[in-house]
């Protein structure tokens, strides 16, 4: 392997950091076969995510929205964590003071064995009551693939259930938001596989920077975050993280 000076430099920062925070986005799951929202191709390409992932879209056509989520659940159920998920899972157990914030809803970080994942946008594998009724918990786990009927019902009141994800225009769970902003106070902040255009997740990068963290980005393309980070490494998450892990171990 041609030793990339950027990887060597980043590994040094990581090995000497007391607190490390990693923010991940849809790019991390591309090597697992999960498309990002902005990629072309596929059955749902006629719709923009903003036309499906909103409360308004759900009110208009819950069956359509659920058909989209059901197809995403099916896709993920037939996929596996890739090397990028696996490296981060190792870090979550090896580094003290490690936090992983993900915008992904696919659960692949958890399946790779990552501990204490902060799920910024919820999970494809959780459902909530749409109303919500007083009998239902805030959300519940549901791994059914495929659903017997679409849209699925709330088992507590028989009304409509909805995906346990954060839609465009909805607020982030305050506890999750607090934990994420707390985690942005760290020595090294790494943003991986995210386009950095969806707020407030994207704000975490500038927040970390303003609190004094060394901030690095891993992405094959430039993003708005590229302007403010200390180091921008052009490449895929699965390739760069594996090389970074090799370098981390070699330095120890
Ligand atoms: P995004 O689609 O806006 O951006 C994806 C980013 O990944 C791009 O910048 C792209 O250049 C980069 N990328 C592509 N292939 C990559 C690779 N192999 N390695 C590293 N980077 C790669 O996704 P986002 O920034 O996460 O934000 C959009 C929203 O989409 C989030 O709210 C998220 O909940 C949702 N989403 C989640 C999933 C998932 O759970 N897997 C999939 C699609 C969308
Ligand atoms: Zn209910």
Image (cartoon, helix red, strand yellow):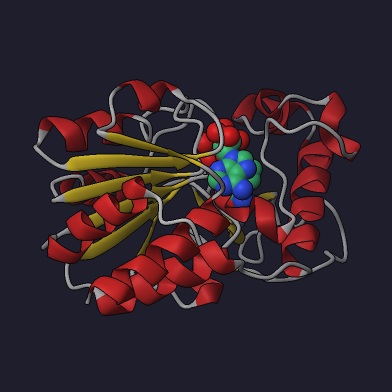
Residue 164 pos. (x, y %): 56, 52
Direction from residue 200 to residue 160 in the image, left or right? right
155 to 221, vertically: above or below: below
Q: Is residue 252 visible?
A: yes
**Residue placed at 20% from the left, 58% from the top?**
12
Which quarter is ligand 2 in? bottom right
Q: Quadrant of residue 231?
A: top left
Q: Quadrant of residue 224?
A: top left
Q: Is residue 137 visible?
A: no
**Residue placed at 83% from the left, 46% from the top?**
67
Residue 100 pos. (x, y %): 34, 58
Report the front residue among 204 and 174.
204
Direction from residue 20 to residue 51 in the image, left or right? right
Report the front residue among 94 and 113.
94
Residue 60 pos. (x, y %): 76, 26
Direction from residue 185 to residue 193 in the image, left or right? right
Quadrant holding the C terminus:
bottom left
């Amino acid at each position: 392997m041609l030793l990339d000076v950027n990887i060597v430099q980043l590994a040094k920062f990581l090995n000497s950091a007391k607190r490390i925070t990693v923010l991940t986005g849809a790019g991390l799951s591309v090597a697992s076969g999960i498309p990002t929202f902005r990629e072309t191709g596929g059955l749902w390409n006629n719709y923009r995510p903003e036309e499906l992932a909103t409360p308004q879209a759900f009110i208009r056509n819950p069956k359509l929205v659920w058909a989209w989520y059901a197809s995403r659940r099916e896709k993920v159920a037939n996929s596996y964590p890739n090397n990028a998920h696996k490296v981060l899972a190792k870090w979550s157990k090896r580094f003290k003071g490690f936090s992983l914030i993900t915008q992904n809803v696919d659960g692949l970080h958890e399946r790779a064995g990552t501990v204490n994942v902060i799920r910024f946008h919820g999970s494809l594998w959780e459902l909530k009551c749409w109303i919500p009724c007083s009998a239902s918990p805030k959300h519940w786990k549901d791994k059914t693939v495929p659903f017997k009927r679409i849209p699925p019902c709330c088992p507590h009141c028989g009304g409509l259930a909805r995906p346990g994800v954060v839609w465009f225009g909805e607020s982030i769970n305050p506890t999750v938001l607090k934990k994420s902003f707390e985690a942005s106070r760290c020595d090294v902040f790494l943003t991986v596989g995210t386009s950095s255009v969806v707020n407030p997740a994207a704000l975490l990068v500038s927040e970390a920077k303003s609190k004094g963290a060394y901030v690095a980005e891993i992405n094959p393309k430039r993003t708005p975050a590229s302007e403010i980070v200390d180091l921008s490494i052009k490449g895929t998450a699965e390739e760069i993280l594996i090389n970074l892990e090799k370098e981390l171990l070699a330095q120890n």
